[in-house]
Amino acid sequence: MQPLASPLPMRRLPVYLLLDTSGSMNGEPIESVKAGIGAMLAALRQDPHALESMYLSIITFDREVKMILPLSPLESLVMPEIVCPASGPTNLGAALEMLRERVMAEVLRTEGDTKGDWKPLLFVMTDGVPSDIQSYNEMIPKIRQLGFASIIACAAGPKARKDELTPLADHVVTLDTMDGSGFANFFRWVSASVAAGSASAGPSSGLQLPPPPPEVNLVF
Amino acid sequence: MFQADPELHLKPLIEYLTQLHAGGVAHGAVLPGCIVVSQTGKIDITLLGSRCGHPEKSELPIYYPDGTGADISESMLRDRQALGAVLHYIVTDNPPSRRERRPLAENPASKSWPPEFIQTIDCLLDGKTLLADLTATFSTPKIVETIVPESELPPAPAVIHAVEVPRPNLRTIRLANAMVGREFSETFTLPHDMGAFDFQAIEALSEVPSGLRIEGKSLVGIPEKAGDYEMTIRVALSGDFGTKIAPEFLLQLMVNPDPKSLWKNLPSNREDPFWKPDTAGKWLSEGPLSVIGASIRGRSHAHVGSFRDDDLEMDWMAESAWCSFTVADGAGSSKFSRRGSQIACDVVKNHFREHLCKPSENPFATTVAQWTTAQDDPSAKSKLENALYLLFGNAAFAARNAIEKEAAELNATGRDFHTTLITSLVRPMENGGWFVATFSVGDGVAALVGMPGGIPCLLTHPDGGEFAGQTVFLTMKEALSTAEGIMARISYHFVPSFHALLLATDGITDPHFDSDTRLADPAAWDLLHAEIAAVLSKATSLEESASMLIDWMSFHSPGHHDDRTLIIAKPSVS
């Protein structure tokens, strides 16, 4: 098994993670999310597909929207600090706006001299309802046009309303509790979805999701 | 070691603290572990700033390790004591304690503070000028020891309690990620707020991950084991570790596994009704072309024990001198695509055999011959295109119909059998030269290598979308929906000579051609052909060539693990 003399730049699987860091996430929920992401990355590092082709970007949203991790290869990425203010609104609309700019700028599409990336994946995690509802509603069709293979939203905890997320996402999952095991299960499921996404070299039909873990409720 | 000079070393620190206290601002703990002194003796005061406008340096201890230091007055008191510790640290070669972590209370006399230290601190804090002889007193540790007999020392001040507790949390520094088996070399750099300080060497205080070692200022080597490692290191700021100023850090390093080592090779299920071998080699030893072909299961399928979805067929029809070659790539996400590609290859081969084998019953060869001798004649061209349209169009439809028929028998749909189809007909012409025609649906290609200029090397137009993995399948309605569309999938050329005709699925072309532009570049195909020819040069038979081709096709290219299928047809040396 010889490596190619000059390996070509590989096709990337861009994965975007939008994380709610509004006031209500402060404390145990955000710590659980961090632990969940850490475990997810550790699991993905054991998947050869993901290790070779996955690129991850993390955008957090509260009063402010921050891209805390620019699109980086799994192999070399270092988890940034996730800061959650003690209080603040859930500006998901503004987060989608930044997401759109990033996707337009960094996801490669096939042209004469360029090979396109795999279709990107989007995971949105929130424990509330968007505070900037008008902007959120305006962004939904724009996000849907970006060519995501799949948009998966996670409504965590009792205050999250899945109805708000169904127009945005192909799949909405709900977590009844916002503790460590719930988030751990969700991110385990995310990593399984990403692994499935990076392995699928199929037609442009939607991503086949693995069945969700018991604590994650898939909403149709 | 630089010449100890308490005024030079401590004054900026004291002024800074005074300023903070005057402003009512709390600050980071004044501990030797947090104080860095440059070779010229300047103290880096920014390290203490964690509570006054440097929130990102959260790893700095903001309280004394024993939990005090929370309010201003307490912190002022502590500062006075801690400065004594710092001064001691700077001036003597053996500061009381910190590394040994010996409980000082056990033997207070041996570690107590000379009154000169306390005096000096008081002088400095009160803004008084240091006495010259006092400075001289501190210029060597030896004098300190001789001047103050241990028995006469006052009881140890409170600061010794602060220093006997465990070291404050070390600052962490994360290095760039490494990978098992890959050369690693990362030069250690101090955090940006310590950037003014030069340093000479680092020393590991705990185990270094296997395969790595410290060389000068760098961590180098080839890591052997994956993991998320932490190690403690010491930085010699002024030449060697015998000096007092050697701050410690916690170094974090992620070593990724080598993805090559993670690929599993699980057998496919032989009990499956559509099972086929994970590799296939074929060759044609008779006819005007010597032909080899191979098809292998991609790593992505081997990893999960699924099947090879690609397929290939080749044929030499001696009666009419036609050769046909077909490759097909089943969609990874369709459950029976391995069967879809197989049906496509079989049906197309048989369709050509049925229509081209008996020249007396089919005027196609004559039509081709007429066109090759009069390529500018519109009627000859139109007659040829009609014949090609019927031949390729019907072959494609026959393949699709056969797939749909089998799908219906299984209560499945054509979608479950999605496959691409790349097929080529080649015939040596009576007056020399070759006629080459191709038809393709999907992202595989047919290409010619080594023909005279003017003829495009790429014979097909691969169907692709704006993202990777998007293509058109034979089993999709749109593939054969209009006559114009079908005609556009056909190409035909008269070629005086060529070195090789290649038919390849995207498992071969993706790792070798980085864009559609490159795919149309004859030089790129020459390179690929030369690479393969070099590999096959030692083969003594076509069978051996096919087997060598299978070996070559398992080349490793990160991110490219699809099934791979390739047919190479070369004019036989006669």
Image (cartoon, rainbow, N blue to C red):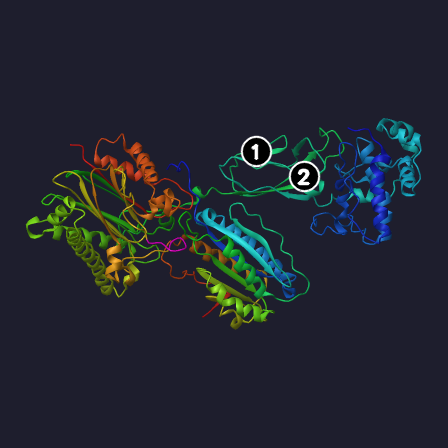
Q: Residue at x 53, y 45 (%)?
A: A76
Q: Residues within 10 Å of mark 1 (few under 14, many from 20)?
A: some
Q: Is B258 positioned to the left or the right of B305 in the image?
A: right
Near-viewer residue (B235 or B363) = B363
| Residue B8 x %, y % | 84, 35
* Foreground label between 2 and 1: 2
Q: Secondary structure at mark 1?
A: strand
Residue type beneath disc 1: Val
Mark 2 surroundings: few (<14), some (14-19) or many (≥20) residues within 10 A: some
Which residue sits at x=89%, y=35%? B114
Count of residue discs: 2
In magenta, the rendered stretch is B463-469
Q: Quadrant of residue B235?
A: top right
Q: Residue furthest left?
A: B360
Q: Are marks 2 and 1 on the same chain?
A: yes
Q: Secondary structure at mark 2?
A: loop
Is label 2 in contact with label 1 (beta carbons under 8 Å)? no
Q: Of residues A138 and B374, which is closer to you in this image?
A: B374
**Separation of marks 2 and 1 at Cα, in angstroms:** 17 Å
Pointer 2 chain: B
**Quarter of the figure with residue B11:** top right
Residue closer to the observer: B558 or B368: B368
Quadrant position of the N terminus of chain B in the picture: top right
Residue identified by numbered label 2 = B190
- Name the residue beneath numbered marker 1: B220
Horizontal side of A145 relative to A80 (left or right) equals: left
